[in-house]
Image (cartoon, grey):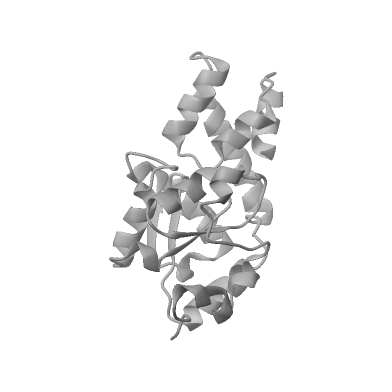
Amino acid sequence: AEAWRSVAAERGMRIPEELFLSCVGRNARDMRAIVSRACGDDFPFDDFTDRTRAWMSDRMLASGPPEKPGIRVLFDYFSAKNVPIALATSTREQTARTMIEQARLTHYFSAFAFGNQVEHGKPFPDIFLLAMRRLGVETPSSCVVFEDSPAGLRAAHAAGMKPIFIRDTIDPDDETLSLVWKRANDLSQAAADSFYAELGRAISA
């Protein structure tokens, strides 16, 4: 959001906050369509997104990517339980891998699926199903998905998985929230066997 505001100001543009929020969780193809509908087909989308990526890259090189509270507690919990973790992000591969490497989180993941690797982005289920296949898992209902965007929550539900809502910048509408399996304000809250008891069995090593 900061990158969008900064780059827009540099170029003398005014981009409503609501437009940014409507793009959260979407891949580049869908973002282009959303922005074009709002700002017109002559909007310099490629230049704008290149500049926002450069803005974020500069900040992350200086201070590292910001982390969601509890991320390492949760990942350590799953690692100790031998539960494989996949990353399914709408962000394109190069950008996402750079952020993961800078945050030193790469070693936690057993599989990756990126926004440029599927035909249909969130809220379609494609990216989560791709991540599941790359994990070698066959049953969607055995997968939990941590998501902070409405598009991602709908995609996880459409995939037949169990969406866990982690609030960030967006409050989903009631219809989307009705699809949520669990909620957690901090990822560390989900680092406990009791959190998954409703699956019929606790996560075990």
Observer-nearest of 123 and 97: 123
Image position of 122 with respect to 188: above or below: above
In the picture shown, does residue 90 fall above or below 63? above
Can the viewer see residue 10? yes
Q: Position of residue 85 (x, y in %)?
A: 44, 68
Q: Which quarter of the rendered picture does the N terminus lie within?
A: top right
Could you tell me which quadrant the C terminus lies in?
Answer: bottom left
Q: Position of residue 73 (x, y in %)?
A: 61, 74
Q: On the image, which quarter does residue 189 sit in?
A: bottom right
Q: Residue furthest bottom?
A: 205
Count of picture labels = 0
Residue appearing at x 46%, y 80% in the figure = 203
Residue 46 appears in view:
no
Residue 59 against residue 70 in the figure, above or below: above
User: To which quarter of the image does residue 122 belong?
Assistant: top left
Q: Is residue 151 above or below residue 48?
A: below
| Residue 201 image point, x, y percent | 44, 81
Residue at 69% over, 21% down: 14
Q: Nearer the viewer, residue 126 or 1?
A: 126
Q: Residue at x 46, y 73 (%)?
A: 199
Residue 7 relative to residue 49: left or right: right
Q: Which residue is at 67% across, 52% downward?
A: 62
Residue 108 rendering spot, x and y as whole percentages: 47, 70
